[in-house]
Image (cartoon, rainbow, N blue to C red):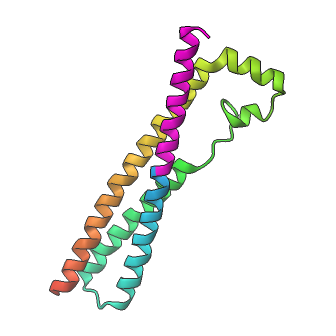
Amino acid sequence: MSATDRGLSAAHAEVKAEITRTDTKTGLLLAFVGAVLAGAWTVARDLPLTPPAYLVGGAGMVLLVAAAGLLLRSTRPNLQGRHGFPLWATLTAEEITTAVQRDLAADIAGLARLAVAKFTILRRAVDLTLTGGALLILAVLLTAGGAL
């Protein structure tokens, strides 16, 4: 195996590992957002909320739902067949060997673009989650303080 082949294999493994890490983070954040949404809904349903608390809390809930939507979009399978599993499912064993040998650099580039897209969506979802959580905390403070 040449140095170039080893470098390509290492880059391929690194990109795949980054996708796996991003997907793991996405799954954990989606579970967290779901728990916060469920908890906030349960608490808000039983409290006498002031109009400002409704407004701020509602905005926080909308941001959390938007974050959940982004996270779901990030984990949505890509079945367009350009690289990876969908393409391989259409090839014979010999064609896979040829495609991997010939197109490893293209596969790395495609996977790297996928990783960046997933990371960008995850980052936006984290920002929405932080903002939504801050608004929910503000709604709790408005309710506890009885602000009108």
Residue 41 x, y percent position in the rendering:
41, 79
**What is the tally of numbered marks visible in this picture?**
0
The overriding secondary structure of the stretch rendered in magenta is helix
Is 57 placed left or right of 2 in the picture? left
The quarter of the displayed image where residue 130 is located: bottom left
Name the residue at 41% across, 83% down. 42
Does residue 141 appear left or right of residue 73 in this picture?
left
Whether residue 148 is visible: no
Quarter of image, res 111:
top right
Q: Looking at this view, is 106 or 8 the one in front?
A: 8
Picture residue at 37% right of the left edge, 46% below the top: 123
Query: Residue 80: horizontal and vertical position, in percent?
Result: 68, 37
Q: Is residue 96 left or right of residue 10?
A: right
> Is 17 within the magenta?
yes
Which stretch did the figure color magenta?
A: 1-24
Q: Quadrant of the N terminus?
A: top right
Q: Is residue 47 left or right of residue 25?
A: left
- Residue 99 is situated, as x and y percent measured from the top left of the image, at 72, 20
Can you say whether 144 is above or below 5 in the image? Answer: below
> In this view of the protein, which residue sits in the foreground, 15 or 121?
15
Q: Is residue 105 visible?
A: yes
Q: Tell me what residue is drawn at x 30 percent, y 79 percent.
A: 54
Question: Per the image, is 2 magenta?
Answer: yes
Against 4, residue 68 (above or below) is below
Residue closest to the far front? 1
Locate the C terminus by quadrant. bottom left
Q: Residue at x 35, y 59 (%)?
A: 129
The spot of residue 69 in percent (x, y) is 49, 58
